[in-house]
Image: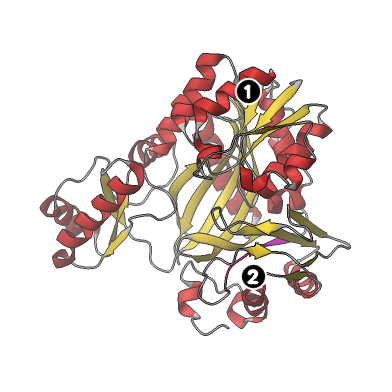
Amino acid sequence: MFKRVLIANRGEIALRISRALRTLGCEVAIIHGREDRLSLPVRFSDLAVANYSSNPLESYLDYERVIEIAKEIGAEAIHPGYGFLAENASFVRRCEEEGIVFIGPSSDVISLLGDKIEARKAMEAAGLPVAKGSNEPINNAREAAALATDIGYPVIIKAAAGGGGIGMQIVHEESEFESALNLCQSRAKSAFGDDRVFVEKFIEGAQHIEFQVLGDGHRAIHFGERFCSIQRRHQKLLEEGPWLDAEVRAEIGARVCAGAQAVGYKGLATFEFLRDKHGDFYFLEVNPRVQVEHTVTEMITGHDLVSLGIRIAAGESLSLTQEEIEISGHAIQCRINAEDPVKFIPSPGRLWDCHFPAGFGVRVDTHAHIGYEMPGCFDSLLAKMIVWAPNREDAIAGMKTALGETVLVGVDTVIPLHKAILDEPDFQSRQITIQYLDEHPNIL
């Protein structure tokens, strides 16, 4: 096991990683910007290194400085968490060059999976179901329209280097292609420095389902699925699991493990799918990192995924078999964002009062506390509230109780929206697609 690991992140995920490292007997080091100098992850670390910048994001994005700090303090490994440098292949390549372990997959694997066109090819070759579409970049509207005629409208244009839904454009007829293609290419170039786009069949009435995978570079196992269809602007708000019956879980689970093994995946990964109204699955992407909602899987399987990922990075082989992974009960996670619950405008500010619930089956991952200054320059996630119960109905009831006991004074939060969703009949009856919030515009 590593003696000292540097965490290159902030907020609740930095604290979650810190706990896992301490449990494994590692010294915890962390970099931090000026805004986070008094945060809990920094205060609870063994060694904190200030990395101030006039641009707060650069404190966590300047990977040459991160590597320099790791070398200065003798850190054997760097854990990126999610966001920031977690999927930056250039950063991972530099870690490999400097002999520092990156807790996650190799730079080659991240490069492959970060290119949506190449990832689509690799997963299709490994036996995963993919939607009809282009396996090469689309350069002009005429080419795109010809492909769409073959596929069948509607189709969607996506950025090859994209993520988070940035630039995606849905096209319903040929006349829309010229402007949609130009817009997607322009946004892709601006966001990712890469204007390549591709076209695939748009899955109407889709549900978003993802599988949690762990690989050691040779063998891979899965920990079941999570249901993540309640989203706004392609950002998840509420996640839960399990969702599928055992037969479907086994079938898709075997395929994602084959996909992970085909690319020699090492570490935690999430394979994301859209499922149509007929129950057919279509590969979406692989997130090569710990996922925000990994907590749901931990609650229903009883396994510490973050620690398992660290063990793999330290050189251990998979210690579990697929047969040992059992799913028990149901878990729901609500992301508590510091945002206006109707307009989703960020709500930075000081927490003058702060109380989170506890009790049977309740877990809260947060870096918040009384007096915490929620900055406006980072992601608005303030806490993740997870409730486990023997079944979905009891998990919903438990989450409503937990949200009702939560006190956060000084910022707006999306708690009123979560309460409304939990009471909404379509949610309760599992009639949910990725258009759920659009289809319920007056839920608050």
- Residue ID for mark 2: 413
Residue 351 highlighted magenta (yes or no): no
Secondary structure, mark 1, is helix
Hey, which quadrant is residue 82 in on the image?
top right
Measuring 54% from the left and 71% from the top, which residue is drawn there? 432
Q: Is residue 207 left or right of residue 101?
A: left
The residue sitting at 81% across, 29% down in the picture is 24
Task: Identify the image quadrant of the N terminus.
Answer: top right
- Snapshot colouring: secondary structure
Bounds of the magenta span? Answer: 331-340
Left or right: 282 with respect to 409?
Answer: left
Residue nearest the viewer, comparing 210 with 308: 308
Q: Position of residue 415 (x, y in %)?
A: 67, 72
Q: Amino acid at mark 1?
A: Ala
Whether residue 267 sits left or right of residue 170 in the image: it is right
Residue 357 visible here: yes
Residue placed under numbered mark 1 in the picture: 70
**Above or below, 34 relative to 175:** above
Are there few (<14), some (14-19), or many (20+) residues within 10 Å of tag 2?
many
